[in-house]
Amino acid sequence: MLEKAIKNHIETHSGVTVVDIVKFLYQSVLGTHHILDHMKDNQIETWIKEQLASARPADRPLTEPLFGKSWVRLDLEAFKHKHGNNYRLATRMFMNGRCVERTESKEFLQTIERLNKLLLDRKIKPTHSYIDLSVAAERFMKTYKQMGFPPIHHSASFTKQNSPYIIVPSESHPIKPSASEDMCTSLSARQKKRHRQPRSITANKNKPETVSPGGRKRKRGNKAQVHVQGHVRPRPSSLSPCQSNEAPSSLE
């Protein structure tokens, strides 16, 4: 439920503004595709390495839920407590965002409209009574709409008072540093399996088996393989959603 998710976000964080609520919803619906589309892999790795290096280890849950089931926030302080400065693992988890199906922007706009109504009806209240979110929301939403609802940064108050994080697909967990296969690989395999045509070999019981031209049997290792009438070659699988194009060199 949207109202419950937003209230929980306000209660569990400090310095939350309307900007931070909008960012929370943007990440929940659209994830990290805007970053993956506009930064090269080495740029993303450098950015995560720097964020992790400055994080202070903290013993708390690794992830924080967002609104929806596709994405979570990976707490870098909790990550560092468990995995040290393993920025390659953190980067691989972030890159797995390419495997998550894109959501249409209209779904985000609908979520923003629902947020706006909650704020105007004063169903969403801040933890500090001196902050009137409904008034702040009206001003911000007007400007945000004129900008075309782009991805935005956290407010200075939120950044200062909360731990750093990165957004990763929820299917990245539980994480295993020794794992050699990331989520993209497994998703790609499942996608190919769904699209692969079954290998079909049929033989007419009233007709004898036929062999390949020349009357020979083809051998593979120690086993003889007979070509049977009706053999159907499976069609190639469609492209996996995990396959991605190279991103531009810099943010727009």
Image: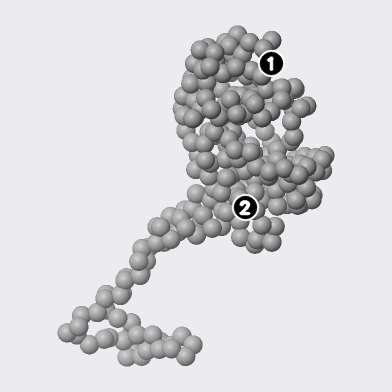
- Mark 1 secondary-structure assignment: loop
Under mark 1, the amino acid is His
Question: In the rendering, at what x and y percent does residue 68 appear?
Answer: 52, 36
- Where residue 50 sits, quadrant-wise, is top right
Question: In the rendering, at what x and y percent does residue 12 appear?
Answer: 66, 30
Eyeballing the image, is 246 above or below 34?
below
- Dot 1: few (<14), some (14–19), or many (≥20) neighbours within 10 Å? few
The residue at 50%/49% (across/down) is: 241
Q: Quadrant of the C terminus?
A: top right
Under mark 2, the amino acid is Pro
Question: In the rendering, at what x and y percent does residue 154 appear?
Answer: 69, 26
| Extreme residue toward the left, this view | 206
Is 144 placed left or right of 197 in the picture?
A: right
Eyeballing the image, is 37 above or below 185?
above
Eyeballing the image, is 246 above or below 155?
below
Residue 49 visible to an observer of this rendering: no
Closer to viewer: mark 1 or mark 2? 1
Residue assigned mark 2: 174
The residue at 76%/44% (across/down) is: 59
- Mark 2 secondary-structure assignment: loop
Q: In this rendered view, identify the residue nearer to me: 91 or 232.
A: 91
- Where residue 75 sits, quadrant-wise, is top right
Residue 204 visible to an observer of this rendering: yes
Residue assigned mark 1: 128
Q: CA distance from mark 1 to mark 2?
A: 36 Å
Q: Are marks 1 and 2 in contact (CB under 8 Å)?
A: no
Q: In this rendered view, identify the residue nearer to me: 20 or 241.
A: 20
The way the protein has been coloured in the rendering is one colour
Is 157 placed left or right of 217 in the picture?
A: right
